[in-house]
Image (cartoon, rainbow, N blue to C red):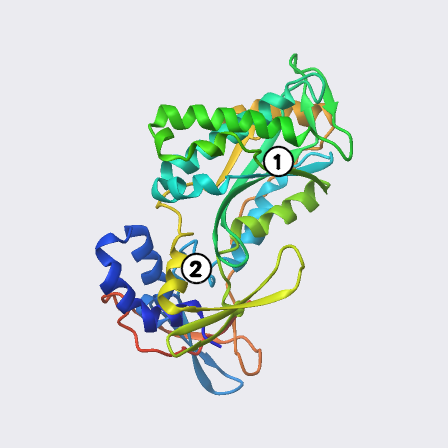
Amino acid sequence: MPELADVFRVHGPAYVKKYGERMLPSHKRAMQDIVRCRTGELGGATYYCPECTDFHFSFHSCKNRHCPKCQNDAADEWIAMQQEKLTPVPYFMITVTLPSELRRTARSHQKTVYRLFFQTSAEAIQLLAEDPRFLGGAIGLMGVLQTWTRAMEYHPHIHYLVAGGALSPDHKKWLQAKADFLMPAKPLAVIFRAKFRDALKKAGLFDSVPQKVWEKDWVIDIEPVGDGEAAVKYLAPYIFRVAISNRNILSMKDGRITFRYKDSKTQEIQFRTLPAERFISLFLQHVLPRGFIKVRYFGFYASSKKHLLEIVKELLAVRPVKKEQSVRPEKIFKCPDCGKPMIAVQDIPAKRGPPFSMPFGRHNEAILK
């Protein structure tokens, strides 16, 4: 089956020729990196299998965060890094969605709107948490921005993972939340709407938004997601998933791309076929601005308030995690035929050429364990 790189390799040149002058640098870079990922363009190494007496090639990854080939190992590493932040309490997922009327402005002013989206939604959650009727103290939350639906349509929303409780104002008590309730969603949505409206005014973007959006109900969902370890594993796919995975691209024929996705309401597999130009456009609208941080921490999870997290851990009698010197394990390349370790015999230098210069095709890659 074709991969995203194949789509860009075949149809990318025509797309760039047509829209290149209007394309963002981050979009061009994403296309270029994905096409070159794990090919001779980025270099690599030649390996020899003593068992099969055969040679194999392993090419370097592009490491672009939007590449479907480069996110597999990153999730496991991130989960391990979150261990220091975990506390033995129930966790909740708060999903905050931008109304459809705001999406055109968000797409045209991504850096500004996404930043305000994070800022105002986190402030709203923290403000309601301080209300004595609910938690009455400072909370910790980590949020990740996601911009797509399963059908790849533009749908900006933030998933917040929130510890089920709060640190009292005097920092002497842990105020435990109920196992199935953190805070009410409707008042939270009202607070968020007001804060976002004020932020748009200050940013000079208020007039670009249809006024009816301020009169409708905004949508926020809150649900329990288990303990700390389960919650982090729950959040990890939202962080490292890209708009579409290679395994869901089914065919590329006659200038049209067919892919599958699971309907979020019915949980049934759906199929969608689009002209290649439309498919590429859909994918690129989810490429984030260069340098934009899509995972952010607030409250006692923020790095600037690390001392508060230590107080929370003391109150919850959390044993400190023993820090061991981080040693990256040696990569062992195994033969794709017999599975035995291979020997590196030669480096393959990178070939820096113009984008989309590679011929269509797939390269033989070693299995990396």
Foreground label between 2 and 1:
2
- Residue at image x 28%, y 51%? 25
Label 2, secondary structure: give it.
Answer: loop
Q: Nearer the viewer, residue 91 or 369?
A: 91
Q: Residue furthest bottom?
A: 53
Q: Outermost residue toward the right?
A: 179
Dot 1 crowding, Cα within 10 Å, few <14, some 14–19, many 20+: some
Question: What is the x, y in percent for residue 326?
Answer: 53, 47
Q: Residue at x 23, y 64 (%)?
A: 17
Q: Earlier in the sequence, mark 2 or mark 1?
A: 2
Q: Quadrant of the C terminus?
A: bottom right
Q: Is residue 300 visible?
A: no
Instruction: Classify residue 348 by image quadrant.
Output: bottom left
Image spot of residue 72 (x, y percent): 53, 59
For badge 2, the amino acid type reads Cys
Indicate the secondary structure of the residue bearing disc 1.
helix
Above or below, 330 relative to 324: below
Q: Quadrant of residue 46?
A: bottom left
**At x 67% / y 59%, what residue is drawn?**
266
Q: Is residue 250 left or right of residue 356?
A: right
Front position in the image: 137 or 199: 199
What residue is drawn where x is 63% and y is 26%?
187
Report whether residue 41 is seen: yes
Q: Which residue is mark 1?
A: 85
Label 2 to label 1, Cα distance in Å?
28 Å
Task: Give percent across and percent down for residue 113.
Answer: 40, 36
> Which one is in front, 327 or 240?
240
Tell me the residue that label 2 is attached to: 67
